Image (spheres, rainbow, N blue to C red):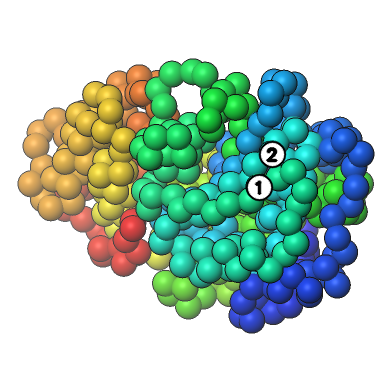
């Protein structure tokens, strides 16, 4: 599988910044007409395009749900909150290809009968904010669709779909605990598509080139390409965004990103809602949602964060879990007390102040918080902890005996 397929990132050099409207139109042409707009939905369904926000829900299916519910109008939100600390793909896409994102958002609005497109951008993604704001101003208006920019709170949970709606409605960027879901009743009570910006950009290309073009890359079961953020390969501390075909192996991705497979023992796949895996066991596993799920892992937001050889996996996991505890919505017991207790036990293990049952408690607490939260945030933390306990089992046992065979990891969580 090739790691060099350029679809979203084709065009002018990324270092030159945002592609202007005139250059965007000259390269790709104006948006194609799709009749009422709903004609695009079957094409997206045929393409197999999956959402890129982490859950991997089919884009065409999501749009169809809203289109069928929108008897009195709808809203589309282009979700560029990207609260995942080590992921850089969404902010890079918005900062360099803003018109492709807006194209996708307008197509979604036409398809579901929406009269409003909201570009929801993380408030700390300054280059992306500037590019999207300028793109709105320089392009001609779209009749019947109002386009606006909203800044998302710089919090991990603020990009979750119900949190997006909650913030836009009430200024509170925390996930909602109960239905209705956004596609049923969202922004201002209207059925709402909350779609990751990468997903929208792909929809804009599929509208131009067709489902067969999109399916021409990737694996038969998971067609297409995806953006990944590679952290820890090549120059230390420099994240690299790569567009890969689904099915590219970790070995191939590391080679393209300038890394060496034998320089790493563990990798965090899919982001903080993903989990740890051992590099040797994953080197030739295809990087696509289906294959990774079969290995008990996840593609998630496309994050591939490598732990340097010799670094302490317990320390690295403690950093992530401390962050997850601090970034919780703090609106239910599993987050407030469960994640707090997990983080405190991890800190004791790292600091050599371990209590007798800390290691046993960690495993037990992970099972206790899973599925019991007001949102899925504690589930993500529990999954990451369970993966850490598997991958770094020997290191955890040493820490329980107040020892550590590695050095402190240099890559922090936030």
Per the model, the C-alpha gap separating discs 1 and 2 is 6 Å
Q: Which residue is mark 2?
A: 115
Q: Nearer the viewer, residue 311 or 305?
A: 305
Q: Secondary structure at mark 2?
A: strand
The quadrant of the image that shows the C terminus is bottom left
Residue at 87% x, 35% y is 36
Residue at 84% x, 38% y is 37
Residue 401 seen in render: no
Q: Is residue 175 left or right of residue 247?
A: left
Whether tag 1 and tag 2 are in contact, CB under 8 A, the answer is yes
Q: Is residue 58 left or right of residue 150?
A: right
Q: Is residue 40 left or right of residue 136?
A: right
Q: Is residue 86 above or below residue 37?
A: below
Q: Which residue is mark 1?
A: 146
Q: Is residue 212 above or below residue 334?
A: below
User: Which of disc 2 and disc 1 is earlier in sequence?
Assistant: 2
The quadrant of the image that shows the N terminus is bottom right
Q: Secondary structure at mark 1?
A: strand
Residue at 59% x, 63% y is 132
Q: Quadrant of residue 21?
A: bottom right
**Residue 51: % across, % down:** 66, 41
Q: Nearer the viewer, residue 374 or 245?
A: 374
């Amino acid at each position: 599988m090739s790691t060099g397929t350029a679809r979203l990132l084709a065009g002018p050099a990324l270092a030159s910044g945002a592609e202007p409207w005139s250059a965007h139109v000259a390269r790709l042409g104006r948006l194609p007409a799709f009749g009422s707009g709903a004609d695009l939905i079957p094409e997206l369904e045929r393409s197999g395009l999956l959402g890129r926000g982490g859950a991997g829900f089919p884009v065409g299916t999501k749009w169809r749900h809203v289109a069928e519910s929108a008897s009195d109008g709808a809203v589309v939100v282009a979700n560029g909150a990207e609260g995942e600390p080590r992921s850089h793909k969404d902010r890079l896409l918005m900062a360099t290809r803003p018109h492709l994102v807006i194209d996708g958002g307008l197509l979604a609005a036409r398809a579901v009968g929406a009269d409003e497109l909201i570009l929801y951008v993380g408030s700390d993604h300054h280059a992306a904010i500037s590019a999207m704001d300028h793109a709105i101003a320089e392009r001609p208006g779209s009749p019947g669709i109002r386009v606006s920019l909203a800044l998302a709170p710089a919090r991990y949970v603020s990009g979750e779909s119900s949190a997006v709606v909650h913030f836009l409605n009430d200024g509170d960027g925390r996930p909602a605990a109960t239905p209705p879901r956004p596609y049923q009743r969202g922004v201002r009570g209207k059925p709402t598509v909350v779609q990751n910006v990468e997903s929208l950009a792909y929809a804009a290309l599929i509208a131009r080139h067709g489902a067969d073009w999109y399916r021409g890359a990737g694996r038969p079961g998971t067609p297409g390409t995806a953006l990944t953020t590679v952290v820890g390969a090549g120059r230390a501390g420099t994240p690299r965004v790569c567009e890969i075909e689904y099915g590219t192996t970790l070995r191939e991705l590391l080679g393209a990103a300038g890394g060496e497979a034998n320089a790493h023992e563990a990798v965090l796949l899919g982001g903080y809602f993903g989990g740890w895996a051992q590099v040797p066991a994953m080197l030739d596993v295809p990087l696509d949602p289906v294959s990774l799920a079969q290995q008990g892992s996840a593609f998630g937001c496309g994050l591939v964060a490598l732990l340097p050889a010799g670094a302490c996996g317990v320390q690295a996991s403690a950093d992530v879990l401390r962050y997850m505890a601090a970034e919780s919505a703090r609106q239910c017991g599993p987050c407030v007390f469960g994640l707090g207790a997990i983080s405190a036990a991890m800190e004791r293990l790292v600091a050599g102040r371990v209590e007798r049952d800390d290691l046993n408690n960690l495993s037990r607490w992970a099972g206790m918080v899973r599925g019991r939260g007001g949102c899925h945030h504690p589930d993500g933390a529990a999954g990451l902890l369970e993966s850490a306990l598997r991958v770094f089992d020997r290191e955890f046992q040493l820490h329980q005996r107040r020892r550590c065979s590695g050095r402190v990891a240099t890559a922090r969580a936030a």
